[in-house]
Image (tube, rainbow, N blue to C red):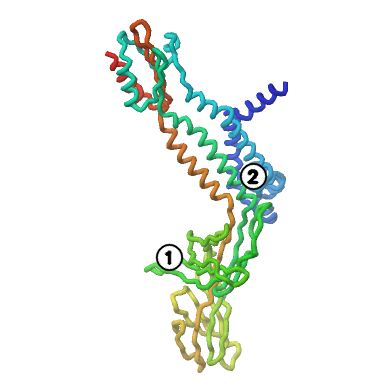
Amino acid sequence: MGTSFKFKALNIISNLKLSISLLLLIALVTMIGTVVEQDKTLEFYKLNYPIEQPILGIISWQFIQRLGLDHIYTNIWFYLLLLFFACSLVVCTFSKQLPMLKVARTWRFVNNSNQFDKFPLNMSAPIKNLSCSLALLNRQGYFVFQQKEQIYAYKGLIGRVSPIIVHVSIICILFGTIVSSLTGFVAQEVVPKGEVFHIQNVLSAGNLSTISQKCIGRVDDFWIAYNKDGSINQFFSKIILQNLNGEVVKKATISVNSPLKYDGIAIYQTDWNITGLKIVVDDNTLQLPAQPNLIQNSISFWSSHLSLGPNPYEQYTFVIKDLKGFVDLYDGNQKFLSTQKIGETFLCDNFNIKIETVLTSTGLQIKSDPGIPVIYFGFFLLMISSSLSYLTYSQIWIAFASNITILGGYSNRAVVSFEEEFYKLFFSFK
């Protein structure tokens, strides 16, 4: 009774229809995760998914919160769904795919003429030419086995390994995804040039993630490369990592899509900003904060204000458009006065002024994704299995009886080329 129940349970779990259904269900859930914004605040969902006007009549913020659709990829039921699908693949691999591979390697001789009628290709010839058929099969790359007057040959067995590799690759991808979700984290830091930072502004983290504080980072420099038309080509940050003893453990210049990687974390360049101006008025050094000015939700320029002269309300405005080394100067009536080069001294309202530097900050995204190597390995196996799946697995049976040679053949793909091989073998008997 117990053995019968286990057999039925394993048969159900390894069922192909169940695996396909689970895969489609995972795809559906993932699609929902791309439509419904993830990891937003409760106020965001109340604003965009009100109860008074639910989408499709049922999707409101309460519906999303109740089913956990606001954090699908870290939800326990999503983990269980992936785990169940992985178990289905494992059981199918050991209960069906591996035994099928073992059967494919077994010598299967056929001596009954009625059995040859079941093969897609079967022919008979009145002439017996054993040595010629063996030589031809060997030249065509077949593994040939002989038992008295019977011959069995096959080639392309590696193509039968493809489904097993597919299962292993999907299991690796699922396992890597779960590991990354449980142990990874994403942090965002905005760091002024020349300042130090450590991981503290965590946006999302897995339930089992740990954030090490054994390393301190410093933004040593920041600059922007421009195109000839004045548009931004790329922006760069020079990052230096030090241990708690102050020793440099890693340094690199990062840019968009070119991160610094160290000890399981990756630091990406994501954004930048102008925070102020450092100027010298006569012999006094000042730092003026810069305010962004938005036009159609995008920053057009930054401005800093400086009061000079006996009238405290007489303000001058410095306008910074980029990091090309020039700053525009305006008076209190917003009248353009001049364009000043950074580092040069100029006279304004009987004061000697020098703009020493534009103060900038860089936006860094710090990620830990431990499952990425496993996921990449899974996709690598998937590409291999896709290539192997194009290999043809072919089988040929030959039997000699009463001066008659009977041939049978089967191929899982490339039927036309296999038929050419089969007929070439058949005519070699004449």
Q: Secondary structure at mark 1?
A: strand
User: What residue is disc 2 on?
Assistant: 55
Rounded to the nearest angstrom, the CA distance separating label 1 from label 2 is 41 Å
Q: Quadrant of residue 98?
A: top right
Q: Callout 2 environment at 10 Å: few (<14), some (14 to 19), or many (20+)?
A: few
Left or right of residue 199: residue 66: right
Q: Position of residue 287 (x, y in %)?
A: 57, 82
Name the residue furthest front. Answer: 148
Above-or-below relation of 130 to 355: above
Which residue is depicted at the point 31% across and 8% down?
126
Above-or-below relation of 136 to 240: above
Q: Position of residue 68 (x, y in %)?
A: 69, 46
Q: Position of residue 72 (x, y in %)?
A: 64, 46
Left or right of residue 333: residue 49: right
Name the residue furthest top. Answer: 402
**Mark 1 or mark 2, which is nearer to you?**
1
Which residue is depicted at the point 53% across and 60% down?
261
User: What residue is disc 1 on?
Assistant: 233
